[in-house]
Image (tube, coloured by chain):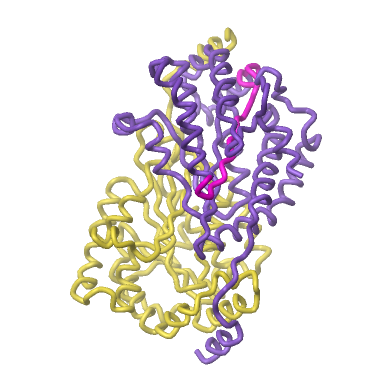
Chain colours: A yellow, B purple
Amino acid sequence: MNRVADRLRVGKGFRLSDVDPAGDDLGPGDHGQARLEIDQLEPEVALLHEKMWAESRRGGRKSILVVLQGMDTSGKGGATKVIDLLVDPLGFGVVSFGKPTDDEKAHHFLWRHQLQLPEPGRIRLFDRSHYEAVLVERVRDLTPADVWQGRYDEINEWEATLTDGGMRIVKCMLHISKEEQKERLRARLEDPTKHWKYNPADLEDRALWEDYMAAYQDALVRCSTEAAPWYVIPSNHKWRRDWLIAHLLHECMSGMGLAFPSHDFDVAAELERLERT
Amino acid sequence: MNRVADRLRVGKGFRLSDVDPAGDDLGPGDHGQARLEIDQLEPEVALLHEKMWAESRRGGRKSILVVLQGMDTSGKGGATKVIDLLVDPLGFGVVSFGKPTDDEKAHHFLWRHQLQLPEPGRIRLFDRSHYEAVLVERVRDLTPADVWQGRYDEINEWEATLTDGGMRIVKCMLHISKEEQKERLRARLEDPTKHWKYNPADLEDRALWEDYMAAYQDALVRCSTEAAPWYVIPSNHKWRRDWLIAHLLHECMSGMGLAFPSHDFDVAAELERLERT
């Protein structure tokens, strides 16, 4: 039970530097098998999503927030595609968080994320998230240390209120090696149709790799709570990353006690009414 | 060129009652062939979407709004799935418009739709839309006649400002026969896992079928403009509906002049910088 979640969950004594971004001991051994097993999950995940949606039509409060974090090129777009493949688009949405606007900066740092939370029945994916407030803002010195240091607790308290309200939060760090990032950036530069994805400033973040890993280490350990654990997804292999994300989502939804709600009409009487129309 | 759009576009002298909801003269002749041809469109539509997104990263203003309207069970969920299959989930979002809240009713009827428009580079799907203000509100007498009668012009003016700003608006009415709706409602009632989708009040709208068709006729004719035409999609066959929607979207995007933007960095120099990291 919950095998993938148990393998990937950030717990006591976790050290990011101990995680192998290749993840060779996890899941199937090749791309074809991974794809096959993901496709097999689709009907089950779709059915669970339909049940969550149906419950919400009768007042249910359950929803799911998926948080994706990772360095440039770590595969947030690809991971989004695999989730999109599994769930119903009517009840699924993606929000990408970039640099905050002046208006957003005038508010508390969690304000813009609060506005984008999923309604009951829905799955919302945050492509980058409130965690940037203790990652890029810390590494790039955009926020004074005494401010960002207080944010871990603020995040934990906020997330606890969300899970108390019926939301499941699945936080995934897509972990690639520094060498893998170099290859992916090189591939972007060598393919003219991918030049638009490249920004010379990407190399500035790359130069701060160790600082980012230290910031991730702290965020992962300080904010992996019972209510909202962090999972580190070895992501050097895209197909393994997709397989792990798909199983994590499936395991999460399987544990939510989702069921079609009972109805309050007489089926036979409604069939008769219908026939008369 | 634009064959599907030309066949389905609501033009001068259009009469909804002339449209055959089976659509037997449109597209391929069976489910398997339709699915194959939709799958073949996927890489092209995805590439066009990527180009639109890339343009927007460099200041481009193009976006797409897809409006889906239709009677209960006409297949708005299924049509959403086929679009979701073709585009990139990072740049795609769905908004379902239900009965307006008190807060929404206190505003102009277009207010809540304005808030949900796509940003540049994105595709947004409205599952029901501002057209409900001249459909259900008219048929159910929720709004005085002199108010809803003014809304056709208001909608046309609003949509024109949107298309002037770079948005394409693709408005689709999913057209099923009254008999087909009966079969779909019966199927819902006969499948316990679909009971949650059934609401006894669905039969009240069904009893007003002719009034709805009259309201659709007026909305389609009065609001099918050069800037934002209406398309009527014969939807008795789900696979034909999907094929038509997919081709309509593809034709729309093919006509937007989308291209990857030029970049302002020296690729060789960036490759060298990268190698030194």
Residue at 65%, 55% (x, y): give it. B257
A214 relative to A34, above or below: below
- Asked where in the image residue B101 lies, by quadrant, the reply is top left
Residue A69, how many percent across, how many down?
A: 42, 67
- Name the outermost residue toward the bottom: B276
Q: Does the magenta portion include B220?
A: no
Residue B4, how many percent across, how many down?
A: 73, 38
- Asked where in the image residue A276 lies, by quadrant, the reply is top right
Viewer-proximal residue among B15 and A161? B15
Residue B170, how many percent across, how many down?
A: 59, 40
A54 relative to A232, above or below: above
A225 relative to B216, above or below: below
Residue at 36%, 82% (x, y): give it. A211
The reply to whether residue A256 is in sight is yes
Please state, as top left, top right, bottom left or bottom right, where the N terminus of chain B lies in the image. top right
Viewer-proximal residue among A242 and B63? B63
Viewer-proximal residue among B167 and A229? B167
Residue at 59%, 10% (x, y): give it. A275
A117 relative to A137, above or below: above
Residue A116, how many percent across, how many down?
A: 36, 51
Q: How many marks?
A: 0
Q: In the rendered structure, which segment of residues is drawn in magenta?
A: B164-182
- Asked where in the image residue B263 lies, by quadrant, the reply is bottom right
- Name the outermost residue toward the top: A276
The reply to whether residue A89 is in sight is no
